[in-house]
Amino acid sequence: MSWFPEHKTGQSWIHRVCQRILKTGPIPRHVAFIMDGNRRFAVKKHMERAEGHFKGFDKLAETLEWCLDVGVTEVTVYAFSIENFKRSKDEVDCLMELARQKFARLMQEKELIQKHQVCVRVLGNLTMLPMDIQELIAECVHFSKDNKRAVLNVCFAYTSRDEICAAMREVAEGVQLGLIKESDVSEDLMEKCLYTSQSPHPDLLIRTSGEVRLSDFLLWQTSYSCLSFVEVLWPEFSIWHLYGAILHYQRNFPVIKSAIDSDLSDRLRRQRESDHNVVLSESGSQVPSISLACQVQQYARLREARIEQFLHHVNSKRLCYFQELVSRKKAVGV
Ligand code: FPP
Ligand code: MG
């Protein structure tokens, strides 16, 4: 099965009516999925484990179409956790083979990616993957990077704690190289060093299979997300479960929105206080208040410029990693 539909699959009138009703309320821009329950599904249906994962991929493709139709423009999926490397060799090999096939297929269907204008990003500690899969991923990411209609983030060889450690290493290196100062380190800066730096935080996170935990997925990014735990195995997830989760989001929207707004204003206040304290500590205690305000403003501009340069450095490194893999694949001619 393809990642994206070649032709639109027909929707029944009842789907269309429900979709219209949902669209009168706030639609989450970004939905994250923990696609759990593939193996239990396989056992239930007397299938091989591998088939359960392949059915899981088919469900992902269907879900992407439902999301696009209802107006969700960004989807993030937990496709392979770093913890999954601890599973049996057979199962890890099977999941790698699934990825190999599906990323290769994605590249055979370039016109579908272009038609749907989907930007595919793969987030995680990619160096843990076999080299041929890294190359395939790099090709997909590079090919689709300028697409603007929708974004699909595939978390692969990912855990949130590993992502946060990687961001901390970037920040520590920036301080060590003198690109940024210790006082520049803030929640905003950390966020911009996460793999998800290009994305808004998920508005809604859906986990299937009835498990009610996050399993090290997007821990930083889901502080203010609406969480929906669905009692169905991933391959059994239906459009009605998606609509139910969106309805749950709409019911909780006012409370979530006010929490996000209050967090944003807190962050701005903390940043102003930090700039103020740095200027005071650098210029001594006796600065006239008018001149202090100007100095703080000037300092904030310099800090922003410094951080912009640092982030440029971080993003260039990531870009180089992908570009090298793409060139390598071309050179080998696979
Ligand atoms: C969790 O179910 C699912 C996974 C570990 C793999 C999810 C992967 C896909 C749905 C395919 C995505 C592939 C690509 C290339 C994007 P589980 O194995 O934990 O099942 P269980 O909870 O029943 O044991
Ligand atoms: Mg599981």
Image (tube, rainbow, N blue to C red):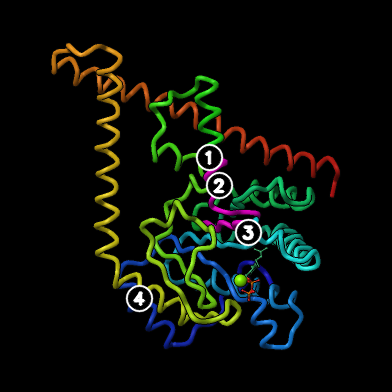
Residue at mark 4 to residue at mark 2: CA–CA distance = 31 Å
Residue for point 75% across, 63% down:
92
- Contact (Cβ within 8 Å) of mark 1 with mark 2: yes
Categorize mark 2 by other alpha carbons within 10 Å: few (<14), some (14-19), many (20+).
many
Vertical arrangement, residue 273 with respect to residue 61, above or below = above
Q: Residue 113 in the image: x percent, y percent?
A: 62, 59
At numbered mark 1, what does the secondary structure look like: helix, strand or loop?
helix
Tell me which label, 2 or 3, sits earlier in the chain.
3
At numbered mark 4, what does the secondary structure look like: helix, strand or loop?
helix
Q: Which residue is mark 4?
A: 247
Number of numbered discs overlaid on the protein picture:
4
Q: Which residue is mark 2?
A: 163
Tell me which label, 1 or 3, sits earlier in the chain.
3
| Amino acid on which the number 3 mark rests in the picture | Ser
Q: Residue 311 in the image: x percent, y percent?
A: 50, 32
Q: Is mark 3 within 8 Å of ligand 1?
A: yes
Residue for point 30% across, 22% down:
278
| Amino acid on which the number 1 mark rests in the picture | Ala
